Amino acid sequence: MPATPLFRRIDVAPAYQKVADAIEREIINGRIKPGEPIGTEQQLVAQFGVNRSTVREGIRVLEEGGLIRRDSSRRLQACLPRYNKLATRLSRALILHEVTFRELFEASMTLEVASVEGAVERASDDNIAELAGNLERSAAVVGNPADLAELDAEFHVLMAKASQNRVLQLAREPAAQLFFPTTEMIVGRVPEGGARLVEAHRHILDAIKRRDKEAGVLWTRRHLQDWRRGFEKIASLDRSVEHTYMEHAYAARQ
Amino acid sequence: MPATPLFRRIDVAPAYQKVADAIEREIINGRIKPGEPIGTEQQLVAQFGVNRSTVREGIRVLEEGGLIRRDSSRRLQACLPRYNKLATRLSRALILHEVTFRELFEASMTLEVASVEGAVERASDDNIAELAGNLERSAAVVGNPADLAELDAEFHVLMAKASQNRVLQLAREPAAQLFFPTTEMIVGRVPEGGARLVEAHRHILDAIKRRDKEAGVLWTRRHLQDWRRGFEKIASLDRSVEHTYMEHAYAARQ
DNA sequence: AATCTAGCTTTGTCGGACAAGCCGATAAGA
DNA sequence: TCTTATCGGCTTGTCCGACAAAGCTAGATT
C-alpha cells in the first residue's frame, strides 16, 4: 500500500441515511432555522434524486431524533429537539441497562442539589411564582399520592428551570423520569410522607426566595433522604430499575 | 356529554408508528432481550399485516432510537442503546438551544466532581489501571494539543466509568461532548497548559488510588478552573455554543 | 474433508398507484 | 355583501410489484 493512499474511503452509507445526514447538517449548522419548512416529500425527491420511499425513511430518522416535525398540516419543518422526548429515550436506555435505584439516587442527589444551588442564585420572579403555584397545589392534594407525586416531579422540573442552566435541566431529566414515579408508592405507604414532602418543598422555595443557598441545599438533601428512607422500606436500593416498573415512566411519554 | 364517556379515544397513530411501538414494547418489557433477533422484514410484514415500506419506516424509527440494530449480515436484532450515540443527540439539542459555555462549565463542574467522588469510593483495580494507562499516554503527548485533548476527554470518561454509576456516566456525557473539544484550542494557546492538565490528572488519579476524596475533588475543581481560565482568554463564557463550533463535536460522531 | 459454485433469501432502492385529509378557489345561498 | 357549500389540486400514508447487490446455504467438485 502506498504511503499516501490513492483513494478516499468510498462512502457506502445507504441512501436514506445520506438523506437524513444532509438535512441534519443543514439544520445543525443553522442554514435551516427551527420553524422553517423543509419542503414537501416530492421536492426532496427531486432535490436528492432518490425515490420517495427512500426520502421517507430518512425523514423518519430525523423525526425520531427530534430535529424535524410535521406541523398541523403535516408539512415538514425543522424544530428544536424537546428535552422531554430525548430524555425519555435515555430513561429507556437506563432501564435496559438495568441501573440500580442506588445509582439513580446518587446521581439525582448530585443533580438536584446543583439545581437548587442554581435556583437560589438565579431564580427569576416568574420562576418563583411558578414554584409557589406548584407548592400551593401540592398542599391541596397532600392526601392524594398520585396527584402529589406528579406535582413533586413538576416541582423539581421547575427548580431545574429556575437554575437557568439548560445543560443541568437536560442532564437531570433522564434520572428524574425514573426516580420520581416511585414517589407515589412511597408517599402512599409512609405515614406523614405527603406532609413531609410538602414541608420540604416549602423550605426549599423559602430558601430560594431568601437566596439562602445553605438552607436550599440542606432541605433538598433532606427531601431526597426522605425518599431514600421511604424507598428502603419498600425495596432494596440495589434492585435494578425493572421492566415492569417501566410502565409508569413509559406511560408518561408523549 | 355523559359523565362516563361512551367511547374510548380512537387510536389514529399511523401504521409505521404502531409497528415501532409494538416492537419497542416487546423490547422494553423484556420479552425480546438484547441480542435476540427480531425477524426479517418479510416476517414482520406477515405478522403486522402491513406493507414492507411501512415496516421499514417503523424500523428506521427504532434504529435511530438505538433499540434495534442490524448485525453483520444486516438482520435485525434488539440491542442495548449505546450511551454515546444517545449523548450525541443530546449534544445536538444543546447546540440548537444555543446553551452558553457558562452553563456547560457549571454543569460539568457538578458532574465531574460527582464522578471523581464516585471513583474515589468505588474505582476497581481495572478502572485504576485504565486511568493509569491513559495518564501515561497523556504524558507522552503533552506537547501535542490534538492528541492530548482526546486523551483528556478519555480520562474523564474513564473517571465516570470508575464511579460505577451508569446514570452519572450518561448524565455527564452530553455536556462533556461539547465541553472537551475546546480543550485542544485552550491547551494549544496557553503556555504550560498541557503540563498543568497532565499534572492535574496525575493528582486526581493519585487521590483515587489513595481513596482521598478531598484531594480528588480539589484537583478536579482546579482542573476545570484551569479550563475556565484558559477559555476566558479566548472567548467569553457567555458566548453560546455555536453552530460552526459544532463541526468538532460533530465529526466525532459514529 | 475442504473448497467452490449455484441458487435462494434478504435488504436497499425504485416506479407507480390510490384513498384520505388539507388548502384554496369558486359557486351558491342568506 | 357575507357566509356556507362544493370542487379540484396537492400532500401524505399506505400499498403493490419489481430488481440488483450482498449474504447465506447446500449441493457439487476436487
Image: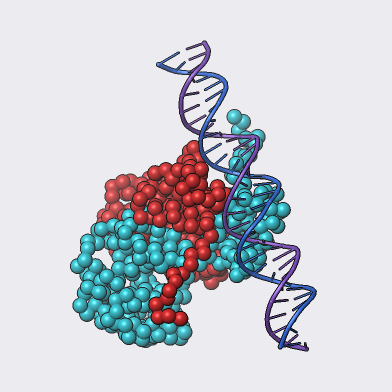
Chain colours: A cyan, B red, C blue, D purple
**A229 to the left or right of A16:** left
Foreground pick, B111 / B49: B49
Indicate the quadrant containing the N terminus of chain A: top left, top right, bottom left or bottom right. Answer: top right
Query: Can the viewer see residue A96 in this picture?
Result: yes
- The x and y percentages for residue A128 are 42, 84
- The x and y percentages for residue A186 are 25, 71
Marker count (numbered): 0
- At 27% from the left and 55% from the top, the residue drawn is B122
In the picture, residue D7 is in which quadrant? bottom right
- The x and y percentages for residue D15 are 58, 50
**A191 to the left or right of A67:** left
- Figure check: C13 above or below A127: above
Foreground pick, A65 / A129: A65
- At 27% from the left and 70% from the top, the residue drawn is A185
Foreground pick, A183 / B187: A183
Query: Can the viewer see residue B250 in this picture?
Result: no
- At 32% from the left and 86% from the top, the residue drawn is A140
Foreground pick, C1 / B162: C1
In the picture, residue A138 is in which quadrant? bottom left
- The x and y percentages for residue C6 are 57, 22
**B42 to the left or right of A185:** right
- At 48% from the left and 38% from the top, the residue drawn is B72
In the picture, residue A191 is in which quadrant? bottom left
